[in-house]
Amino acid sequence: MLKKLSFASLTLLLASGAFAQTTTITPSSPVTTTVGGSCTTVISSVTYEASNNSFSINASSCGTTTPTPSFALSISATTYTIGSGAAAPVITWTPNAQASGATCTLTPPAGITGSISGNTFITNTPTTAGTYTFAPTCTLNSTAVAVSPASVSLTVSTSGGGGGGTGSCGTGAQPSSSINGKVLQRQCSGDVFIQPGPIAGSQGLAQTDLGKVLGGTSFGSYSYAGYSPTFSIQSGYYIALQFTPTVSGSFQMTANPSYGDGGTITVSTVPGAMTQGSTGFVCGVGRSAANGIYVSTAGGVCGVTVGTTYYLNIADVDTAGNNLCYNGRPNSCTFSTVSYTIYQ
C-alpha cells in the first residue's frame, strides 16, 4: 500500500507542471498491482509529457494466469509378459512447480504388489495375468490435486498362447473336449518347475513336449524320477505334453499336493481329450488329491503302442469344470498350479 501511495504522489507532482516538458520518474522499487485477482503487473516507471499533458507507464505485461497444482501420470510399460524377464513396470507421477509440497498415495490393485519410492510406485514382477488400473490420489494442504491422466493401466499376459492355436502349439484351434459343458483352450507355454528345490525349472518354457520338460529325455528313460514337475496353468486352459514311445517301457504320474493340485489328467492321441468317450481318449482320472495314471506299452488301463504319438493332458479342473485354484477358493484365480510326481 505504501508503494502505491508514493507512486500516486509522484504522478500528482508531474501533473503540477513543476517539471520539464518530458520527465520520467522511477520509484526506488517497482510497484506491483494485481489484475483480475490472479495476474500481477509490475510498474517500473512513469513518463510525463507536458506538451500534451499525458502520462505513459512502463510496465511488464500481465502474462498468463498462474497454473494450478497438478501431477502428470505415466507408466514405464503398458504391457508385461509373465516369464519374459523384462523389468517390472514403474508408475510415476510428476508434479508441476505449483504442486511442490503435495503428497500422493497409491493403493495397488488386487493381484499387484510393490512399493512407493518418492513419486514412483515400483511394482514387483507381475505373476498373474489380467488388466490392472493405477490411480494415485494427491493432496496439497488438504486440497485434492488433479492427476492427468487420472489413471494408467497395465495388461499382464502369459507367454503361452492357448486357444489361438499358433506358435509352439502348431496350427489350428485346439480346444479340449467338453468338461461338464466347459471347453478349455490349449496353453502353449508357461512356468514349469521340478520340485522340490526346484532342482530345475524355467519361466515361459514350452509346455508341449513331455521329454523336453523332463530334461530333454525320451519315453522309457525320463529324468527326474521321484521328483514333481509343477505347472502353472491359466484358468480356462489345459496343457498337452506330447510323447511317442520308441521302445517298450512305462511311467507313472501321481499328484503331489505339496506343490499343486491334482487336477484332471488324461492320455489321448489328440490334444485335449479330457473326458471318457471323447475323440482320441485313451485313459484318465478326474480331480483328486492323490490321483494318477500308469502309462505302459505292456497294456493295462493306460496302454500305449510303440511308434504312436500321444498327449499327456493336464488341467486344474474338477469333473464339474471348476478351476481348482491351488490353496484358494475354486474359480477365484487367474493362474493355478498342478503338480505330479513322475516315476520311471
Image (cartoon, grey):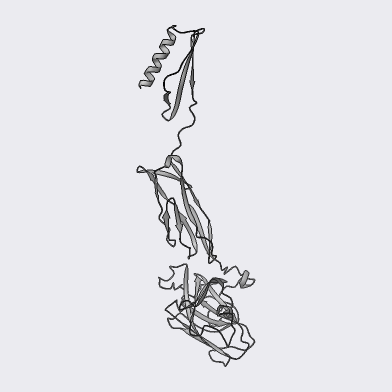
Q: Where is residue 310 in the image (x, y as percent from the top left)?
A: 60, 82
Point out the image quarter for the N terminus.
Answer: top left
Tell which residue pokes out farthest to the front in this image.
Answer: 28
Residue 41's place in the image compared with 327, above or below, is: above
- In the rendered image, is residue 187 in sight? no
- In the rendered image, is residue 258 in sight? yes
Residue drawn 47% across the image and 67% down it: 334
Q: Where is residue 60 in the image (x, y as percent from the top left)?
A: 49, 25
Q: Position of residue 286 (x, y in %)?
A: 47, 81
Residue drawn 53% across the image and 56% down it: 78
Residue drawn 42% across the image and 54% down it: 117
Relative horizontal placement of residue 160, taking residue 145 as reference (left or right):
right
Q: How many badges with numbers are in the image?
A: 0
Relative horizontal placement of residue 159, taking residue 4 as reference (left or right):
right
Between 228 and 332, the one nearer to me in the picture: 228
Among the 4 quarters of the image, the one containing residue 172: bottom right
